[in-house]
Every structure is written in structure tokens, then in C-alpha cells.
């Protein structure tokens, strides 16, 4: 059985064999993972104070790498229709004074709003079509509950098609943000 001293000496010996590039890569990997964990923590617990407190543990280049990873992960996880995530992202950006994200906020908000309006418009039209079909079959009144928007492949396709240009636009915005954040 090895003593603690022998184990420590072996570890030091291994460290001597690691190149500066490998150390830098390992540091970047650890910072990226920490940034992803902070993003996940924030999205689930929504506690900006916890993130800011965690970031205070780091300084200089290390802090920059953790923050960059945090922002990249938050941006990558943006999805149309997930207004909570967008709100959390913009609130955190405001509190942490991230001008890049804050500046993009109105454009993303407008995109989310337009997307929601387009999808709701299509859903209304599909519901009306469904009710007309049922009415043609002499089924109406209390016999008709909510129209299942997933009942016909055509309806699913219309909703998906309505979302497509907005998803492409969000992808363009996210790509621009990620390039700026790097």
C-alpha cells in the first residue's frame, strides 16, 4: 500500500510531463464545464446571485472563460416559444452588464412575439377547419371539445412550416451572438 506522500509524488511527476498546451486545454475544458453547469443552475433555480457569487471565485482569464461558456450555453439553449429561458437570459445579461446579449434582446423578443402570433394564427385556422369538418358531419355543440391539432399530419406540417422561418432567423441570431461572444 502506497503512502499519501508517494501518491502525491507520483502526481507531481505526472504534472511535470504535461505540456503547457495540455494544461491550457485542461483549464479551458474545466472552465467550459463550469460555465455550462452555471447556465443549467440558473435555468433551473433562477438565482442570479448564486451565479455572480460563483464567478467571484475566479479572476482574469479563468473568469472570462467561465463567463464565455455560461453565455454560450445560455444562447445555444434558446428555443422559440420558451419565453422563460429568454427572460432569464435577458435578466441575467442585464444584471451582469453583458451588452452583447442585452443589445440583441429587443430583436429576439420581437422574433419570439412574431413566432407566437404566427403559430397561434395557424392554430386558430386549424381549429376552425376542424370544427367545420365536424359540423359537416353534423357533430357540434357540447359534443365537440377541443380540436386535436396533432390529429392530422397536414395540420402538424402546417404548424411546423409556420415555425420554420422563425427557427432559421433565431439560428442566425444565435450564430451571430456566439461568434461575438467567442
Image (tube, rainbow, N blue to C red):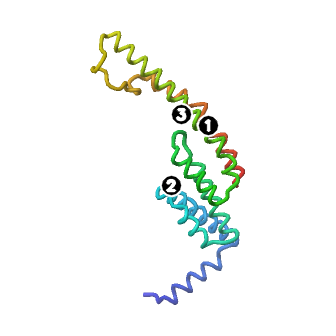
Counting other residues with Cα less than 10 Å from the Cα at mark 3, is it few (<14), some (14-19), or many (20 or more)?
Answer: some
Residue in the foreground of this view, choosing between 90 and 2: 90
Counting other residues with Cα less than 10 Å from the Cα at mark 2, is it few (<14), some (14-19), or many (20 or more)?
Answer: some
Q: Which residue does the image show at 61% across and 37% down from the upper left?
A: 111
**Which residue, as the protein is rendered here, is positioned at the far front?**
141
Q: Do the residues under discs 1 and 3 have CB atoms within 8 angstroms? A: no
> Residue 99 placed where, x, y %?
70, 54
Residue in the foreground of this view, choosing between 69 and 110: 110
Label ID, residue 43 = 2
Please say if 56 is above or below 3: above
Which comes sooner in the sequence, label 1 or label 3? 1
Q: Which residue does the image show at 34% across and 12% down from the upper left?
A: 135
Residue marked by disc 1: 111
Which comes sooner in the sequence, label 2 or label 1? 2
Residue in the foreground of this view, choosing between 118 and 158: 118
Label ID, residue 120 = none
Residue marked by disc 3: 116
Amino acid at each position: 500500500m502506497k503512502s499519501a506522500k508517494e501518491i502525491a509524488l507520483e502526481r507531481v511527476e505526472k504534472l511535470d510531463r504535461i505540456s503547457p498546451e495540455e494544461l491550457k486545454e485542461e483549464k479551458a475544458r474545466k472552465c467550459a464545464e463550469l460555465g455550462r453547469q452555471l447556465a443549467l443552475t440558473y435555468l433551473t433555480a433562477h438565482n442570479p446571485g448564486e451565479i455572480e457569487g460563483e464567478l467571484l471565485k475566479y479572476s482574469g482569464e479563468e473568469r472570462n472563460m467561465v463567463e464565455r461558456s455560461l453565455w454560450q450555453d445560455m444562447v445555444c439553449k434558446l428555443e422559440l416559444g420558451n419565453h422563460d429561458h429568454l427572460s432569464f437570459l435577458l435578466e441575467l445579461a442585464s444584471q451582469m452588464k453583458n451588452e452583447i446579449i442585452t443589445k440583441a434582446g429587443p430583436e429576439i423578443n420581437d422574433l419570439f412575439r412574431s413566432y407566437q402570433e404566427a403559430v397561434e394564427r395557424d392554430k386558430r385556422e386549424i381549429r376552425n377547419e376542424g370544427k367545420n369538418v365536424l359540423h359537416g358531419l353534423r357533430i357540434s355543440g357540447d359534443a365537440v371539445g377541443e380540436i386535436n391539432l396533432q390529429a392530422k399530419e397536414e395540420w402538424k406540417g402546417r404548424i411546423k412550416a409556420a415555425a420554420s422561418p422563425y427557427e432559421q432567423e433565431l439560428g442566425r441570431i444565435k450564430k451571430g451572438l456566439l461568434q461575438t461572444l467567442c
